[in-house]
Amino acid sequence: MNNNQATSSGKEDEIVNKKKKEKLQLYGWIITLGGLLFGIDTGATNGSLAFMSRPDQLNLNASDEGLVTSGITLGAAFGAVIGGKLSDRFGRKHVLMYAAWIFVLGTLGCTFAPNAIVMILFRFILGLAVGAESVISPVFLAELSTPDIRGNFVNHHELMIVSGQLLAYIINALFGVMLGNYNGVWRYMLAFGLIPEVLLLVGISKVPESPRWLITKHQNKKAANILKDIRSNREDVSTEISEIEDSLAKSNKQKKVTLKDLKVPWIRRLILIGIGLGIMQQGIGINIIMFYGTTVLSNAGFSHSAALVANISNGIISTIATIVSIHLMGKIDRRKMVITAICGTTTTMLIISILSFLLKDNSLFPYIMLILMAIFLIFFQGGVSPIVWVLLSEIFPQSIRGMAMGIATFFLWFANFLVGYIFPILLTNFGLNNTFIIFTILNVLSLFYAIKFIPETRGKSLEELQSCFQSSETADDKEMKKE
């Protein structure tokens, strides 16, 4: 082959590899449309709540507001457990498609809800889809990607969540300002979610199944064809399949993992770490802002219309911080990012607690609160939330991934539910500054947890991580025998 032919062949390979990379990225964005719905549906009440609470609408009290807002996260807790198990049995793609249909049903039910009970019920149903999606999408993305892009790829999910929340805030502000005198405006705010739900239903049919899941079902030929379609020509598909088979062979030497196996040290430790990560993420208090940002800004001194518009900045900051996090993910250790970020959220919560007491009657306080909320979001979305989802997708070996991810995200969503439910009650009974003091304490506890328990996973393949954890199992067994 002469130089011209070699150059031509190299260019052709480059074009082919570029197309394969673009195809993989497209699949990633389609999968994470579920994350966009997650964001839209959780952000929808941040602005619509005041309208649906009116006496001539759903007539909600503080407890009702908490249940309407957090009912979706209670449903998500159960959806996470169910979704994880179903995805192990029927595949990531098919269960995600079923979740898309539940999204549609839940949105329609909420849009036409005649009273608080029906609204809470359909918010719970909507949560089942959110929870299933929150388990399936990160794992699906991790199993399609390669180690060098896995952090960024999984982080697409978090980016879509915050983008969905931003979109919900913008829609809420537009409808709230333009149609604020129309009491039923909240129904239009909620109905907006139907648009991306239809896109997910159409798009997910084009996405291939997870190659790793196919190999667990002995469909190696199909898995190889999928990998050839999304891996560059420089990557050896047969080697990747062999690595997956080796990791599965090690897993198969163990009996099938069930809840009874929590007595095994390495399994128990990993699942407890996952549970702690989920509780830590929510205990920091992100959903004070993402669910109740408009309420907090109104309590700080903004009019409701001004709070609706100002709340858009929270969505913008969240989105930008998540994009920055994606670029930092491959350069900075996961553990270091989380610990640094929690130091920032803790400090910001403490400042809010102090200033909400000292400056509560000051005309500048609403703007100070808006700035502090933005700083909190920079730390949280830039270094806590994205990392937690990536860690959850990385730390569990194939043999326990479905069960462990379901358990961890169940506790994440249940903690989310508790935060969403109690916040309006705390705000009503204890006031703004005392409520933020409570969450400052929770931030300190989260920091201690992060320092002591979070492992480092950056730059390691899923198979390398599994080998590492199984090695720790051997060490645990030796330690138990000594005892």
Image: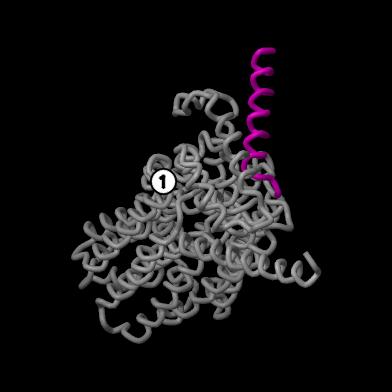
Residue at 63% in and 64% down: 17
Measured as percent of width and height from the top left, residue 176 is found at 36, 80
Report the front residue among 16 and 139: 16
Q: Determine whether, in the image, residue 475 is placed left or right of residue 213.
A: right
Q: Is label 1 in a helix, a strand or a loop?
A: loop
Measured as percent of width and height from the top left, residue 445 is found at 60, 45
Q: Determine whether, in the image, residue 138 is placed left or right of residue 206.
A: right
Tag 1 residue: 91
Q: How is the image coloured?
A: one colour
Question: Which SS type dominates the magenta stretch?
Answer: helix
Q: Quadrant of the C terminus?
A: top right
For this orientation, the residue located farthest to the left is 114
Q: Is residue 470 a member of the stretch shown in magenta?
A: yes
The residue under label 1 is which amino acid type?
Gly
Q: Magenta residues?
A: 459-483
Q: In which quarter of the image is the N terminus?
A: bottom right
For this orientation, the residue located farthest to the bottom is 178
Residue at 56% in and 39% down: 396
Q: In the rendered view, tell whether residue 153 sits above or below residue 95.
A: below
Question: Which quadrant would residue 101 be assigned to in this image?
Answer: bottom left
Measured as percent of width and height from the top left, residue 350 is found at 62, 59
Q: Is residue 408 visible?
A: no
Q: How many marks?
A: 1
Report the front residue among 27 and 475: 27
